[in-house]
Amino acid sequence: MKKEEQKLIELIKTGDKAKIKIAFKTAKTAKIELDLSDYIEIFEWLLQYKKIKDAKSLETRINRLFAVKKLVLDARKLRLNSLFKIPNSIGLLSNLEILDLQKCYVSQLPESVGKLIKLKEINLWSNRLETIPESIGNLKKLELLNIQNNRLVSLPESIGSLKSLKELSLGLNQLIELPESISKLNMLEKLSLSSNLLKKLPESIGDFKNLSVIYLNSNEIKELPSGISEMKKLEVLYAQQNHLISLPQNIGNSKSIQYLHVEQNNLKDLPKSIAENSILKRLVLKNNLLPNELIDNLKKQMPKCDVQI
């Protein structure tokens, strides 16, 4: 690509109408042929699904691309029943804030998604994704990421770079472990990891500063890290249907956990600190291996807590 053409392409990339106008006018006057095939591709892709209005001139088409802030595709209405490919040129929708592709048979997310730096929400619930591109870490404004009910076996380390993320839904996948970087999500308030293949959690999980709800149910976890008791804002902990044989000795020292679900595990004993906890509102212990005497004493010691056995 010649320097003159490159300069005009850069003007178009700004998304500024005035600069786009100058680029097209200059190209016409200087008889410079601009390679805008990627813009044409993404426009026609959106047009195919009626997510953008058609226009005769390429200049108008490009301006309309930059006006797209929300992209929602309903697989049922579109009658999608086969693998759905997202073009790499989706990265040109630089003003996109919401990407919602539920049940669209998506099997791959292109690296170019990392260029959509204004994204605040991504909903890819119930697709066929096995991996997430490393470039997702570039989305510093992302607040919600829903990738539930896919085929993920791992997460990229870059996920810890999502500094604005408040809600992360990863349930119903095939995750075996989590990257240590996940605990760097300081703004995270809700984390769903239910129905995976997790055997353990990162020791650094206690570093979450704003997490209030965590779903760990239906995994293969044998023990919880002691750091989970140190989360200052954690109010709800779902850890039922795992392989837990014990709970952290300090879990009763938590000054924030109000609802603790550990039913359907292999617990034979409980930390003494639990009985001394005055914050707990509900403690669910059904279907464990706890002796009756221990449970009876616990109920007497915690009259204000709804102890369910």
Image (cartoon, grey):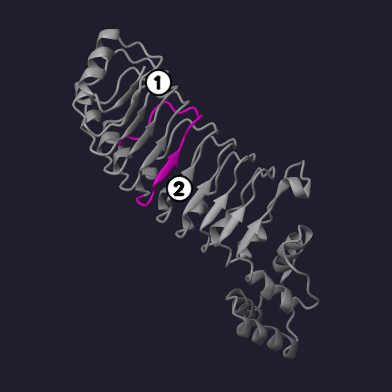
Which portion, as a residue range, is magenta?
186-203
Identified at 54% across, 57% down, the residue is 114
Give the residue at mark 2: 167
Identified at 75% across, 69% down, the residue is 53
Identified at 55% across, 33% down, the residue is 172
Could you say where residue 146 lies in the image, as x and y percent from the top left?
Answer: 53, 45
Q: Quadrant of the C terminus?
A: top left
- The image quadrant of residue 25 is bottom right
- Earlier residue among tags 2 and 1: 2
Give the residue at mark 1: 263
Q: Nearer the viewer, mark 2 or mark 1?
A: 1
Asked if residue 42 lies left or right of residue 134, the reply is right
How busy is the neighbourhood of tag 1: few (under 14 within 10 Å), some, or many (20 plus)?
many
- The image quadrant of residue 163 is bottom left
Magenta stretch encompasses residue 276: no
Q: Main secondary structure of the magenta part?
A: loop
Report the amino acid beneath label 1: Glu
Nearest the viewer among 207 and 269 is 269
Could you say where residue 43 lies in the image, as x and y percent from the top left?
Answer: 73, 65
